[in-house]
Amino acid sequence: MRTTRTAFATPVALCALLTSCTGGDEADLPPTPDASPSTVEPPSQGPLTAPEVDPGQREVLAEGPRRGPWQGGTAATHPEGDLSITVHCLSQSNLTDLTVTFDDGEFGVPCSNLHQTTVTNEWEATSAGQLRLTVTTEETVRWYISAQVTPR
């Protein structure tokens, strides 16, 4: 019978020692996870879409979906009018720049890794002719581009 009593007394004594050491303070409790919402937004679930042709405009060059740099395309002869170039892009890594170069200049687009970025640049009274576009960016960027003219 002593064996049973010793086996029972040992866990009780151990429990009493552990309880007296901790003192029941809240500081000894394990940390509670923070239930506040995260400030990090999850990656976008939506697909990358092509720019739409705006009413009253004629699309003279469209490319995509593509990934990374593109050495350019040339639009057939377009009419004189106001030119707009729209880029939709999405980076698969960090915020990444995309540069569009065309006959009259260039512009940059900061491509997000969370949501599709849409940037449209417009130029008034471009002369009729051909339009050549080039895209410079990293391989992690997917994009569409659309050049549209509002004929005069």
Image (tube, rainbow, N blue to C red):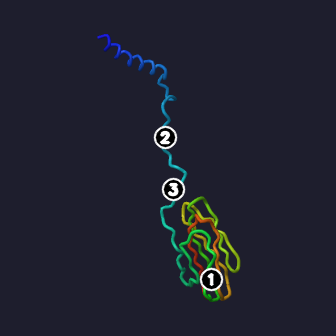
Q: CA distance from mark 3 to mark 1?
A: 38 Å
Looking at the image, which residue is at 42% across and 19% down?
Answer: 14
Q: Is 39 drawn above or below residue 20 in the view shown?
A: below
Q: Quadrant of residue 125?
A: bottom right
Residue sticking out furthest to the top = 2
Q: Which label number is shown at residue 85? A: none
- The 10 Å Cα crowd at callout 1, few under 14, some 14 to 19, many 20 or more, is some
Residue 90 rendering spot, x and y as whole percentages: 56, 65
Q: Is 68 drawn above or below residue 77 in the view shown?
A: above
Q: Is 51 drawn above or below residue 17 in the view shown?
A: below
Residue 28 rendering spot, x and y as whole percentages: 50, 28
Q: In what quadrant of the picture does the C terminus appear?
A: bottom right
Looking at the image, which residue is at 38% across and 16% down?
Answer: 10
Q: CA distance from mark 1 to mark 2?
A: 57 Å
Residue sticking out furthest to the right = 105
Q: Which is nearer the N-term, disc 3 or disc 2?
A: 2
Looking at the image, which residue is at 48% across and 37% down?
Answer: 32
Name the residue beneath numbered marker 3.
42
Residue 45 shown left or right of residue 107 in the figure: left
Inspect the image, locate mark 2, and give the three-letter code of the amino acid beneath it.
Answer: Pro
Q: Nearer the viewer, mark 3 or mark 1?
A: 1
Query: Secondary structure beneath disc 3?
Result: loop
Q: Is 31 drawn above or below residue 48 in the view shown?
A: above
Q: Which is nearer the N-term, disc 1 or disc 2?
A: 2
Residue 1 rendering spot, x and y as whole percentages: 29, 11
Name the residue beneath numbered marker 2.
33
Q: Nearer the viewer, mark 1 or mark 2?
A: 1
Name the residue beneath numbered marker 1.
74
